[in-house]
Image (spheres, rainbow, N blue to C red):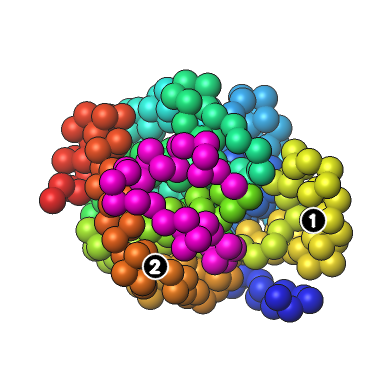
Amino acid sequence: MPLFQPTVPPLPSSLSFAGKTAVVTGANAGLGRAASLHLAQHQISTLILAVRTQKTGEETKAALLADPVVGALQTKPTILIFELDLARPSSVGSFAAKIVAEVPTLNILLLNAGLGGVKWRTTPETGTEIMFQVNFLSNAMLSVRLLPLLRSSAERSGSKSYICTVGSRAQPLHSYTRKPVPDTVDVFAFINDRANFGLERYSDSKVLVSMWVRELAKRTDPAVVTVNNVCPGMVTTNLNDKQPWYIRIPVNLVFAIRARPAEVGARTLINAVSAGPESHGELLGDYTVWENKFLKTEQGKKMQGRLWKETLVAAEEFAPGSVQAAKLEG
């Protein structure tokens, strides 16, 4: 690992999201807030802040509108606040239903929210492991549920839509090579068995994200909806704040030397939601395609296929009819 990260070029001044509607999850802090500001500065017409509480959403909205670049725009963005808690499937369902019912056009779904950790934690409603739920499963459910709206928006506007999930180049630290998922055990069941939890869980969850993106991209025309994931590099955010002190202190020391400000890291997210077809189904490392070799192995391909099938079953249970509506059957 080099001591310093490569420079991330500024976004082009000509970049414009005028006439478009974007959803940003985790929009109240870190990368999500910085990405929201970039979108606002680049003429997004409607920006939907997906946050856990109305209060944090209102604070973020006020800060975005108070930005001098945004304030100087001839047409200010319309900023809406929708509550979303990715750890609660009921909240994910309500959020998706609200989008479908109240938002006529959706061009960008930026799935930024996520979490890390080294302790086993489960979600309050379903008892699933929380990083699996937040970093992967809830994002997959939102992708399926909102894909029809993203497709129809692209077809009406003549401009492609985007589903972008924040990924990670820490994927090679995953546990699946060391401890493969047995053929006799479902991928979901294996991951949600506490005996299979370890320090690699964050990386494990990001491997799942890339697998899902690759499979979804096979069934989506990149000229209509481009599907990708992006690693923003090491970024100064609050992702590490709740780690145990013996992890937080050394990690913070490394971050002090290597980490990018959120504004710089968020440039990679904005690039991803304006990238070309070369990004479809891929993980972007900063601005270029990055390859996880595990996904090209027979083990990786087999696990990816199994994950896809299990996720579609979960999506259909979550929202009956959603898989057919998204044209993901077969």
**Is 249 or 286 nearer to us in this picture?**
249
- Give the residue at x 52% y 40%: 195
- Give the residue at x 25% y 47%: 309
**Is 82 or 140 nearer to us in this picture?**
140
Q: Is residue 230 magenta?
A: no
The CA span between labels 1 and 2 is 28 Å
User: Helix or strand or loop: what does disc 1 sit on?
Assistant: helix
Q: Is residue 133 visible?
A: no
Image: magenta residue range = 169-198
- Assign the magenta stretch its main secondary structure: loop
Q: Which residue is mark 2?
A: 295
Q: Residues within 10 Å of mark 2 (few under 14, many from 20)?
A: some
Q: Which residue is mark 1?
A: 251
Q: Residues within 10 Å of mark 1 (few under 14, many from 20)?
A: few
Q: Which image quarter: residue 63?
A: top right
Percent coordinates x, y for residue 131 in the rendering? 54, 41
